Image (tube, grey):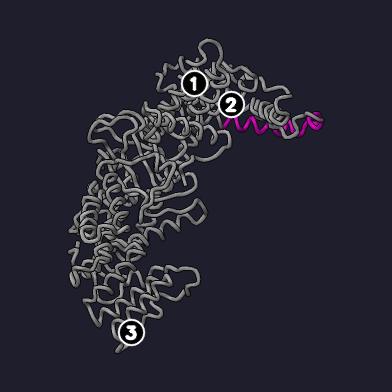
């Protein structure tokens, strides 16, 4: 790697200060415009003008800056510096251009050059601090701001920046994030809402499928594992992959630190040799500015790497998809021990249960409440085959279950064709589309199979539930349409199914954890049971079923959004349904369970003082409203 002081030029960026205009910003980045600014090609209006005094060139740069054309302004300042290389004002102005387009390393070089030319240039000292802030070097930024405040004690910008940098330093070094202000307000910071943080973990290369993340000490449930802002993020649209690739190219062209991180990310290529990056690469706040930085590979090589990083490492959220540096090294499990929370586009990953030293940290890449065949299909599209303990459990007898399901599908098709052809089904109330006959035939076919594995048991329950689904769905829709005046669907048939399922799991000799894993693969059946129990007014039975679903998620997908929603539903239910002498105790127990799960997921509200209690009550209320309205999590962008 080249020295950090040697200019390293490419078609993407210029890493060190050079007297000419910065090629990366001027040639590649679009002009940053204000309303009414001309969309001129980069560098337009900034061509060399012989014999102009540097002051005039600087003023032209100022005018371009005021228009929001930072690339052209920086180029014009470069022309002025060719005439007078030590003009502190021009250097400081160009540093501001770099700050506006997030080329913090170049802003720092110009700010330092301005201070060398004029140590009393206070604006240059402020820009130096902001560049250091952008680079994540918070201790150095704080030092610069304190130097400025020694000279200008009442400078409001410096005072605000100092408070910001001290907050970011606390976040980056200690993981001290004030979650209530992040969840319910928005902290005003110049370049990022919160700092990246990596907790007591490290990257290792000895996992079954390559690299992974393990703890370096025991961790408590709810403890922060890492916090990461995306290198690139895009909305969930058809062009997301291309947008992410463009975002990675842009990040690499602007900042050599980002380039170093991008080159270290998993790409799925054999050429990367399974390299295990030092965690220090993701702890920028420890940097001193003397780190060796890589050269940008040829454009086609980097473009291929970026494409592979997107395919391998991109994380899907509710409305977006992004590339997050450190979380890219976490492996997937269908029974994860860590949970992901999005606050805006910032990712917080916490331990979902207590972890021992050396334990691998797993997150989920996709919905894990699906049965294994569906999960395997999603994993295949991600380019891997999951071998977590839960998948291994459901893999036993998987081929036999798949063959039985295929036979059942053929019988269902034959039954459907016969029902459609039957004139009797043309009458009102008949099985016109043959769906009832198909579901009945499939259920009968699979029920005839020997239940000798979890895979077969899950396939049988799904077929049996599908047979009941049509009638129950129609009855529930009518019940809702008439606002409870029509008959509610009879929950007993579904209840009997779950009782049978539980008995079969006992017969297979499953542990409580294995039962929860299997139950999660058919969790929708259990959720439908509690809905039918609610409509039928069997509130005590519903409370029991809500508790079973919550306990299941606690074992398989702890502290997930589904888990917190389930606990909030239970609180709402108990507040309405609980009665008798033990009412308050029942409600308090439901609220305590919900509070425990919410506090682990959101990192706040678990205290005993009144403020913490009020915060927790508000979070449970918000979750409950989200359930009723079918809304996404309140804090995600």
Over which residues does the magenta segment extend? Answer: 406-427
Looking at the picture, tell me which residue is in the foreground, 415 or 237: 237
Q: Position of residue 343 (x, y in %)?
A: 42, 44
Q: Quadrant of residue 141?
A: bottom left
Residue 341 counted in the magenta span: no
Q: Residue at the top extreme? A: 581
Q: Residue at the bottom extreme? A: 51
Q: Is the residue 65 above or below the residue 528 in the image?
A: below
Which residue is at a point 37% across and 79% down the rendered structure image?
60
Q: What crowding class fits label 2: few (fewer than 14 Cα within 10 Å), some (14-19), or many (20 or more)? A: some
Looking at the picture, tell me which residue is in the foreground, 260 or 505: 260
- Of circles 3 and 2, the one toward us is 3
Q: Position of residue 493 (x, y in %)?
A: 62, 18
Looking at the picture, tell me which residue is in the foreground, 420 or 624: 624
SS at badge 2? helix
Q: CA distance from mark 3 to mark 1?
A: 74 Å
Image disc number at residue 528:
2
Looking at the picture, tell me which residue is in the foreground, 119 or 135: 119
Q: Which residue is mark 3?
A: 48
């Amino acid at each position: 790697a080249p020295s950090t002081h040697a200019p390293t030029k490419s078609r993407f960026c210029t890493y060190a200060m050079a007297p000419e205009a910065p090629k990366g910003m001027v040639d590649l980045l679009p002009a940053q415009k204000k309303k009414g600014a001309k969309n001129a090609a980069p560098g337009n209006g900034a061509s060399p003008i012989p014999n102009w005094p540097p002051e005039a060139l600087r003023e032209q740069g100022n005018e371009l800056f005021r228009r929001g054309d930072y690339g052209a302004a920086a180029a014009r300042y470069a022309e002025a510096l060719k005439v007078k290389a030590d003009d502190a004002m021009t250097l400081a102005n160009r540093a501001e251009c770099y700050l506006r387009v997030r080329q913090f390393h170049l802003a720092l070089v110009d700010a330092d050059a301005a201070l060398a030319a004029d140590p009393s240039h206070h604006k240059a000292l402020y820009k130096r601090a902001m560049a250091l802030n952008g680079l994540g070097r918070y201790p150095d930024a704080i030092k610069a701001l304190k130097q400025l405040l020694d000279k200008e004690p009442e400078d409001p910008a410096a005072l605000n920046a100092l408070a910001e940098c001290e907050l970011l330093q606390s976040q980056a070094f200690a993981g001290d994030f004030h979650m209530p202000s992040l969840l319910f307000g928005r902290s005003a910071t110049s370049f990022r809402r919160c700092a990246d943080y990596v907790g007591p973990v490290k990257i290792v290369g000895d996992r079954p499928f390559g690299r992974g993340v393990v703890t370096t000490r025991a961790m408590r449930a709810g403890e922060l594992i890492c916090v990461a802002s995306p290198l690139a993020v895009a909305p969930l649209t058809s062009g997301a992959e291309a947008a992410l690739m463009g975002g990675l190219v842009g990040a690499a062209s602007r900042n050599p630190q980002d380039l170093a991180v991008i080159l270290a990310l998993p790409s799925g290529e054999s050429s990367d040799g399974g390299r295990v990056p030092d965690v220090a690469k993701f702890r920028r706040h420890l940097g001193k500015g003397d780190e060796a930085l890589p050269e940008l590979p040829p454009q086609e090589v980097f473009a291929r790497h970026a494409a592979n990083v997107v395919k391998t490492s991109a994380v899907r959220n509710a409305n977006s998809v992004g590339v997050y540096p450190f979380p890219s090294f976490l492996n997937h499990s269908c029974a994860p021990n860590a949970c992901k929370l999005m606050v805006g586009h910032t990712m917080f990953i916490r331990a979902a249960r207590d972890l021992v030293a050396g334990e691998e940290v797993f997150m989920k890449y996709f919905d894990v409440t699906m049965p294994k065949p569906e999960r395997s299909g999603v994993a295949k599209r991600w380019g891997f085959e999951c071998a977590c303990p839960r998948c291994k459990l459901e893999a036993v007898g998987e081929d036999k279950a798949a063959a039985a399901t295929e036979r059942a599908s053929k019988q269902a098709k034959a039954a459907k064709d016969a029902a459609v052809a039957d004139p009797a089904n043309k009458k009102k109330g008949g099985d016109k589309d043959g769906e009832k006959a198909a579901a009945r035939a499939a259920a009968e076919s699979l029920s005839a199979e020997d239940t000798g594995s979890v895979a077969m048991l899950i396939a049988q329950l799904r077929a049996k539930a599908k047979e009941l689904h049509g009638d129950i769905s129609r009855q529930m829709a009518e019940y809702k349409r008439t606002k409870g005046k029509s008959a509610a669907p009879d929950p007993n048939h579904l209840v009997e199914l779950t009782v049978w399922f539980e008995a079969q799991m006992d017969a297979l000799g499953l542990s409580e954890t294995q039962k929860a894993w299997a139950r999660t693969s058919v969790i929708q059946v259990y959720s439908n049971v509690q809905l039918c129990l609610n409509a039928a007014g069997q509130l005590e039975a519903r409370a029991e079923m809500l508790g079973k679903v919550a306990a299941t998620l606690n074992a398989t997908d702890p502290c997930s959004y589904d888990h917190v929603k389930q606990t909030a539903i239970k609180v709402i239910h108990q507040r309405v349904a609980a009665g008798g002498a033990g009412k308050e105790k029942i409600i308090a127990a439901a609220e305590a369970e919900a509070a425990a799960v919410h506090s682990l997921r959101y990192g706040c509200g678990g205290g005993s003082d009144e403020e913490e209690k009020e915060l927790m009550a508000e979070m449970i209320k918000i979750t409950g409203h989200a359930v009723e309205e079918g809304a996404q999590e309140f804090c995600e962008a």
